Image (spheres, coloured by chain):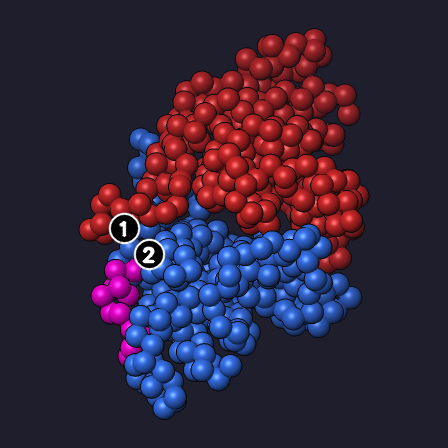
Chain colours: A blue, B red
């Protein structure tokens, strides 16, 4: 089997991404919400119809596209008008996914801006617009990668019991598919691990100065757990179901 | 006194940057050295005379310059041919630094490419060129900010005993200046804290699966301590001395 479909390897990628996501959220939570950076066309002469954050996300994706980021099957761009890779294409391992159009980045971005930022950041404007946008781009890229990795999870699960999955797909039975891809014990383990990591990364580790405010408002572990429980895990599972539904249509 | 010069505030910025730097190094250490990304002109049609990493660094700085990153007195670009800010300038607190030309980014980049990457990454090429370059840009920006923060440290120390510093500066006595800015107890505390953070962030936090390889080669705490002891702290102090030497020339 393609190594990208081994559950152990998928698990390791997802564990590694937890750290990137948690640290990204901690970095963003240093700054206030700075809502102005999400307003479309707030500075039309600079960012056109895009917001400041969207402008930076777009330009970052242009750079990464030149470096062939989006030729990798586990990367999904937020924008479709990107330049082609300037570097010679790499030969990836054979792509184990079937062709599909699943890309939830539009809603990932909307949910991130409307719900995650106000949930983890203190409300207000601290003028740290550029720094906040840089953090947002890092968070969005990590969240997008994590959520779309559901495609690899789904393909791997499909191959374990192809007949049962094919029957549910052909019947268009989303509820059944959702049930088949759900592994509650694993989900609970992810949530416990995420809580431990968030506690661990958010801790102030100075010596002999207990009680001193280190000046960096960090994130609460329960906040990270809630983002995972209420949004990242369900949205990943939605990617899995959507991918499976497209799987037999191709 | 300008709040950016309060030693407590400076200390908090430096503590916060430790986390960004350590996490940045952990992220980079996932990938092999991938030396080809540091070769100037390796793909001239794509990156001109720059290396792949330099190309991405330059384009990232162009984006950040448009978002007025380099109007902030604690930011120093690696490139000088950047576009002017597209957003309206912010009114920063009065810049507490005296005008100066100290910018060690050229040597920071050289040392990072030649020494830090081979020290923290496994030697070889894993084709993760774009991902490695993205990590490099994050690391370089955090390292540059940390090291150049020495200017705020120096200005703050100068104002505590202006006569003594002025005398050493006028005599061009670098050894004396170096001695005056050195605080060995603080340096040792930084190193102990960095070791704890690196241990903490690099730990695998899975539950009930002790001994399992999590698939993410992380960094050794001693490696981070050595980077701090042998390079970050001494280079920050060099920035302090260079800033002080320029301080009375203006």
**Overall secondary structure of the magenta stretch?**
helix
Badge 1: how crowded within 10 Å, few (<14), some, or many (20+)?
some
Q: Compute the Cα span from label 1 to label 2.
A: 13 Å
Q: Where does the magenta region start and end?
A: A179-190
**Tag on residue A20?**
none
Residue B4: tell me if it is visible. Answer: no
Relative horizontal placement of residue A96, taking residue A52 as reference (left or right): left
Q: Is residue B53 above or below residue A218?
A: above
Using the image, name the chain to which the residue with label 2 belongs: A
Q: Quadrant of residue B81?
A: top right
Q: Residue at x 64, y 30 (%)?
A: B110
Name which quarter of the figure residue A223 lies in.
Answer: bottom left
Examine the rendered structure and indicate whether residue B183 appears above or below residue A111.
above
In the picture, the quarter occupied by the N terminus of chain B is top right
Residue at coordinates 47% horizontally, 23% vertically from top-left?
B229
Q: Which residue was labeled with disc 1?
A: B206
Labels 1 and 2 touching (C-beta < 8 A):
no
Question: Percent position (x, y) of residue B197?
Answer: 38, 37
Q: Residues within 10 Å of mark 2 (few under 14, many from 20)?
A: few
Residue matched to label 2: A8
Residue at x 39%, y 45% (from the top left corner): B216
SS at circle 2: helix
On whether residue A185 falls in the magenta region, the answer is yes
């Amino acid at each position: 089997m393609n190594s990208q479909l081994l559950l152990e390897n998928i698990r390791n990628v997802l564990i590694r991404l937890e750290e990137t996501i948690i640290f990204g959220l901690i970095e963003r939570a240093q700054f206030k919400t700075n809502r102005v950076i999400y307003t479309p066309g707030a500075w039309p002469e600079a960012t056109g119809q895009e917001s400041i954050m969207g402008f930076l996300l777009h330009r970052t994706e242009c750079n990464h596209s030149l470096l062939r980021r989006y030729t990798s099957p586990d990367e999904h761009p937020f924008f479709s008008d990107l330049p082609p890779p300037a570097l010679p294409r790499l030969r990836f391992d054979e792509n184990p996914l079937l062709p599909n159009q699943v890309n939830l980045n539009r809603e990932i971005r909307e949910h991130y801006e409307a719900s995650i930022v106000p949930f983890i950041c203190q409300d207000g404007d601290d003028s740290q617009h550029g720094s906040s946008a840089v953090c947002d781009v890092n968070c969005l890229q990590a969240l997008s990668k994590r959520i779309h990795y559901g495609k690899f999870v789904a393909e791997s699960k499909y191959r374990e019991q192809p007949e049962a999955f094919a029957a549910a797909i052909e019947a268009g039975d989303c509820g059944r598919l959702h049930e088949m891809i759900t592994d509650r014990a694993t989900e609970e383990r992810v949530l416990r691990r995420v809580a431990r990591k968030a506690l661990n990364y958010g801790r102030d580790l100075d010596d002999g100065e207990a009680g001193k405010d280190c000046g960096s408002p960090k994130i609460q572990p329960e906040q990270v757990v809630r983002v995972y429980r209420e949004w990242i895990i369900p949205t990943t599972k939605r990617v899995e179901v959507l991918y499976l539904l497209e799987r037999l249509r191709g």
